[in-house]
Amino acid sequence: MFAFIVRRLIGMFAVLFGVSLLVYVVFILVPGGDPAQRMAGKNPLPANIANIREKWGFDKPFYVQYVRMMQKAFTGVLPGKHGEYDILTSFQNRQDVIHEIKRGIPATMSLCFGAAIIWLFFGILVGFFSAVTAGRFSDRLITTLALVGVSMPVAWLAIMLRYFLAEQRSLFPDGEYVPLTADPVQWAYHLLLPWFCLSVLFIGFYGRVLRSNMLDGMNEDYVRTAKAKGLSGKRVLLRHVLRNSLIPIVTLFGLDFAAVLGGGAILTETVFDLKGVGWYAAQSVGDLDLPPIMGITLYGAFFIVVFSTLVDVIYAYLDPRIRLT
């Protein structure tokens, strides 16, 4: 198990290194021209362009540019000429990018953790009851609702929920984020609509996947053997069929949660004005502000790679056969 974890950690750092190189190539090398001029934003002054070119090392070899980009992205600072430290800043509003990302993490974490609990619980519940009542009217009804949820665009659903339930009827707050430490009740109240909006897609998808896995598992040999030993149908269903059918759900949940946490909630945050990392990414893309876009891209890649590694380790713990791969 220890050797497996070490291999996965080495692979994780190799992937992170590859992602960082890809970010450098995509944002700096591929577009061509002067990267300092692109990073300076709209209508830049010549002095500003020259300052960016010097600080980021664009007048030096590519490996120097890469090292400086990583220093800025992962530490937020870069040694200056006289020992001072240059902070990774937005070229539109001169704000500290690392600070802005850290400031948006609580809202993004609150949104993603709450929505993840909802979609995992109801996804398993929907899939279980759909499998148990397979072929009946309730199964067809659940399947129809699940397909509607999967097919519904997140941005459209968020706009409709905010317009009809928050702006027209005032049943829920009209966006914005309240910190958990300030008021836990208002924190949850302000996030109810965003939680529901973000979880609808995953509830339908997880329900369909679990239903399919459980129906396949009911015909396996180990299920027939358990029934032949005299185990009750309920025990066989919960301890054998459901338990083994949840293994793919673990993989889906780890990857989906990492993707949402790494920026997949950008539309929900923007519509409900939650001012999380996704909201900050949308603002940066709209302003064509390169430093925040680079920082947020690396932030999202970090969570996706780390959670993927964590899922692999959990799998190896649950199934020792995976440790050999």
Image (cartoon, rainbow, N blue to C red):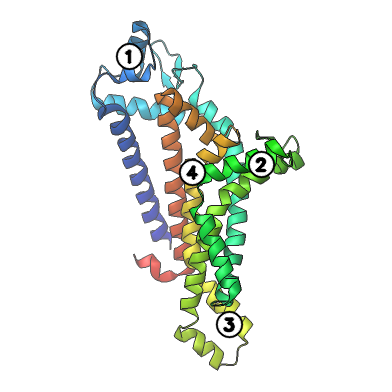
Please identify, in this view, whether the residue under mark 3 or under mark 2 is nearer the observer: 2
Determine whether label 3 and label 2 are within 8 Å by CB: no
The residue under label 1 is 54
Q: Upstream in the sequence, badge 2 or badge 4?
A: 2
Q: CA distance from mark 1 to mark 4?
A: 34 Å
Q: Which amino acid type is shown beneath numbered disc 1?
A: Glu
Element under label 2?
helix
Q: Give the vertical position of 122 relative to 293 (above or below).
A: below
Q: Upstream in the sequence, badge 1 or badge 4?
A: 1
Q: Upstream in the sequence, badge 1 or badge 3?
A: 1
Determine whether label 1 and label 3 are within 8 Å by CB: no
Q: Which amino acid type is shown beneath numbered disc 3?
A: Val
The disc at residue 236 is 3
Q: Residue at x 47, y 58 (%)?
A: 252
The one nearer the camera, 68 or 120, is: 120
For residue 188, what is the image quadrant? top right
Quarter of the figure with the C terminus: bottom left
Count of number-bearing discs: 4
